Image (tube, rainbow, N blue to C red):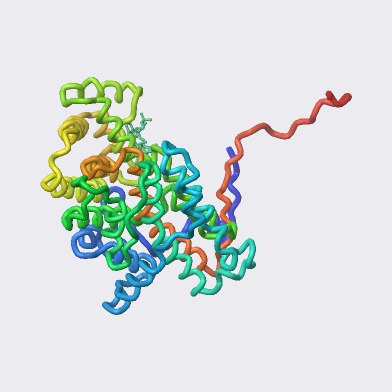
Amino acid sequence: GQILRTYDPGYMNTCCCVSRISYIDGDKGILRYRGYPIEQIAERATFEETAFLLLHGELPTDSQLKEFNRSLMKHCHVHEDVKKFISSFRHDAHPMAMFAATMAVNGSLYPSSNPSIAGQDVYKDKAVRNEQILRILGQAPVIGALIHRHRSGQTINGPDESLGYTENFFNMMDKKGEVAYRPNPKLVHALDVLFILHQEHELNCSTAATRHLASSGVDVYTAIAGAIGALYGPRHGGANEAVVRMLETIGSKEEVPKFIESVKKGEKKLMGFGHRVYKNYDPRAKLIRRLADEVFDVVGREPLVEVAMELERVALSDEYFVKRKLYPNVDFYSGLIYKALGFPTDFFPILFVIPRITGWLSHWNEFLDDPDNKIVRPFQVYKGSGLRNFPSGDLKY
Ligand code: SDX
């Protein structure tokens, strides 16, 4: 077999990662942000408080939170060139492709904080890093709203600096006359909790992508654009969109047994189920399931939820899923809430991007704070051909 060479710790640091941001116990279904259980954060904190906690490691004092909120909203204004860029897309372009491209373009507007232009040491200055963090976090909801409104052929309302982070997003998305978009306080709260539950999740695919890109020394906007690309995949952040499409295809509770059989034959995946780490119920899924009822009380019950509940009931009692430890994950019910709130199905992954930018920026910051940080280069086990000689003779042009 392949003899695995032993490497110095520095090398190991380039293919695994030590972090202090979040902790997951997949067998017990535990998730903590900086040591605080996700259940307590979801119940007691706001999105902004949680963002401060993830970025800085401690909960903010009242004055720190006030200043953080003010700075975030101060940074929410988007460059006119970015608005022109977004309006250059076709109306039916996928929002995730638009968001990733817009984030990368955004980076080209700030050369003084771009290591490829201003030099590698520019990120050694914490104030420069903090400015990028506030700008990206502050602008994310506005870029999302601009993308949504461009696709619906409308302008956005705002942003309104006097509103909170999530309420401002809702307000910008608001389409006069559409009940679900009115920033109803109960709906704003529900979306705030959903945003909190999506902020951070250890070294998932898109966060790992952030750390990979950060290690090359590229500017943070391009690193975040890369993370958005990773999250776009239906096996990752695109799953909330895929779940609703799956439920629409199944159509009714009566069709669930036939669908489950097709999954067991390997013809289809049960989207919203399974996880790389959780081999138990994703703690976020439990909280989102409860949140769904709060939202349905305001905007009316989403009919597909009956199909989802039947799918969950059948799968959790079926040997195929139990044996493989497949449980509902964060995406199983979140898409149903977004649908009930009136968001377009292909916009759901954007509702994952906006909060997850907090986690990506926290890991970016943590990577740059590590004095031993090196370019990431995962370990490879070579299983190809051994040494062999190339046939001699004339070159074949
Ligand atoms: C997210 O990593 C994170 O933290 C991600 C995330 C975050 O917050 O960042 O939590 C967000 O991405 C959640 C996951 C969203 N994706 C989906 O819901 C898509 C459906 N899920 C699957 O694609 C799958 O479960 C993955 C991709 C999530 C995990 O894939 P793995 O690690 O390959 O799954 P596994 O090793 O546990 O699979 C064991 C068995 C296999 O079958 P056998 O080869 O043993 O016969 O279970 C099967 C898999 O084929 N299986 C499924 C299944 N997921 C795994 N079978 C049917 N339906 C599924 N959803």
Q: Residue at x 30, y 72 (%)?
A: 59
Quarter assignment of residue 137: bottom left
Q: Residue at x 29, y 38 (%)?
A: 272
Residue pushed farthest right? 394
Q: Quadrant of ligand 1?
A: top left
Count of numbered circles in the view: 0
Q: Is residue 377 above or below residue 260?
A: below
The percent coordinates of residue 346 (x first, y second) are 35, 38
Q: In this orientation, which residue lies closer to the viewer: 63 or 278?
A: 63
The percent coordinates of residue 143 (x first, y second) are 41, 53
Q: Is residue 217 above or below residue 61?
A: above
Q: Residue at x 35, y 22 (%)?
A: 267
Q: Is residue 278 above or below residue 138?
A: above
Residue pushed farthest left? 297
The percent coordinates of residue 60 (x first, y second) are 30, 74
Q: Residue at x 55, y 49 (%)?
A: 378
Quarter assignment of residue 322: top left
Residue 266 is left or right of residue 88, and the answer is left
Q: In this orientation, which residue lies closer to the viewer: 303 or 8?
A: 303
Quarter assignment of residue 347: top left
Q: In this orientation, which residue lies closer to the viewer: 147 or 36?
A: 147
The percent coordinates of residue 3 (x first, y second) are 60, 44
**Quadrant in which the C terminus appears:** top right
Residue 284 is left or right of residue 365, and the answer is left
